[in-house]
Image (cartoon, rainbow, N blue to C red):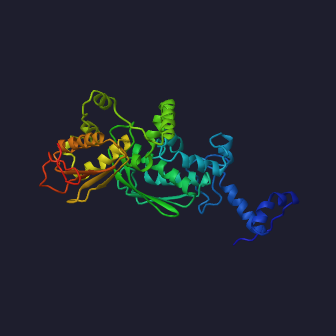
Amino acid sequence: MIRKNVSLDEVHLQKLQSLLEKNGGNLSAAIREAIDLVSLCPESYGTQDVSSENPGKKESFPGAGEELLRNEECVMVNQQMIKWLIRNSAGKLIDEDIVHELINPYLINTVPELIEYLNTISKQLGWKIEVSTSCGENLQNGCTSMDFTGGDRDMREFLVEVACIFLSRWAGLDAEALHRRSNSITVYLRPFVRHDMLEATPGVRNLFGSRDILFREIERKPAFWMTLAELYTKFNYQRVNLDKSLFEALLAGKLPDITKYFEVKADRSLREIPLQELLPLFKYLVVASQLVNDVEICAEKGKECIKIRHDYSEESVVLKLIKLFSNLFEAGLHRFSVTYVSGLIIFDFSLPDISVEDVVKISPDLDFYE
């Protein structure tokens, strides 16, 4: 430790008053903290970092603090306000132009440069997040994971998403999985060839864009979605969402074919969808349409079944609903039996000896019906 005599006027002590109170009146600690604060705000690009172990090394990136405020690159925002903004935009992907405002792709070419830059801006902006990686020298080669440690949880999530979008756009890497701990996030990466530069990679969309379509559709047609939300709320979600062609068939007294909706969602023909995948897809589409109240599925091999709960009181409506769903499973060449009681329809696929043409109705005499 180097000891030097320092002369201070009363005006200087007054300026240090808040730091003195913070450090319990310890003048040396207050001065050290003042020096640390000044070192985070270099006056210009390339200024030497006096707190660095290597005082001769120049910073690779522009400074922040007062310099960024003067250049209008940053503004002062209350921490709770920025946390609220981040939390309430969760699920919407950050636009790439915003990512490029934070990380310039023409200045970052290697993994060390990216890590150094992320750590630099984290330090300059006061995020206190430390970034490390197991990647090799090149962005496109050997990158397996990145660790983001410390700082605020929401800011950490934000920085992880920014880094993953940047890597997916410029490094041919996609986010495969996230491991969240109390004070860190590890993102696992895999090589991915991005053919459509306008579309997010699958991993980035799954991990960070769960509500991206919702946000963007509301922005595109706000009046429509506001009206729809108001109607669903006022009627306690007792509304049915039908495609126009399906609605037209019902008005014409016909039983519509719903197989195309499953094929569009699965992106292949119905006969190519295994039963273990078809059952969750059935629940997803049928519940979303509000045709029924709920669908409980069992996709365990050899015990496959679905329990459909509804509140229709007319038996003729229930029978048409059974026939509508039966046609779907028959088109997929699945063998099943059907039973129903008040408010419940059960499709059982675990009885291979039952013909797909047979439908069983639960009643006192267990009659078959056509």
* Residue at image location 59% in from the left, 58% down from the top: 128
In the picture as drawn, the residue positioned furthest to the right comes out as 10
- 199 versus 12 height, above or below: above
Quadrant of the snapshot with the N terminus: bottom right
Residue situated in front as seen by the camera: 12 or 226: 226
User: Residue, x 34% and y 32% (percent of image)?
Assistant: 243
- The answer to whether 180 is drawn above or below residue 316 in the figure is below
> Residue 241 in the image: x percent, y percent?
38, 36
Residue 5 in which image quadrant: bottom right
The residue drawn where x is 37% and y is 57% is 144
Residue 207 showing in the rendered view: yes
- Res 345 seen here: no
Spot occupied by residue 186 in the image (x, y as percentages of width and height): 44, 59
**Residue 264 screen position, x and y as percent:** 28, 38
Q: Position of residue 256 (x, y in %)?
A: 25, 33
Residue farthest toward the front in the current orientation of the protein: 364
Query: In the image shown, does 370 or 277 lie closer to the viewer?
Result: 370
* Picture quarter with the C terminus: top left
200 horizontally vs 269: left or right: right
In this rendering, would 164 be left or right of 363?
right
How many marks the image carries: the answer is 0
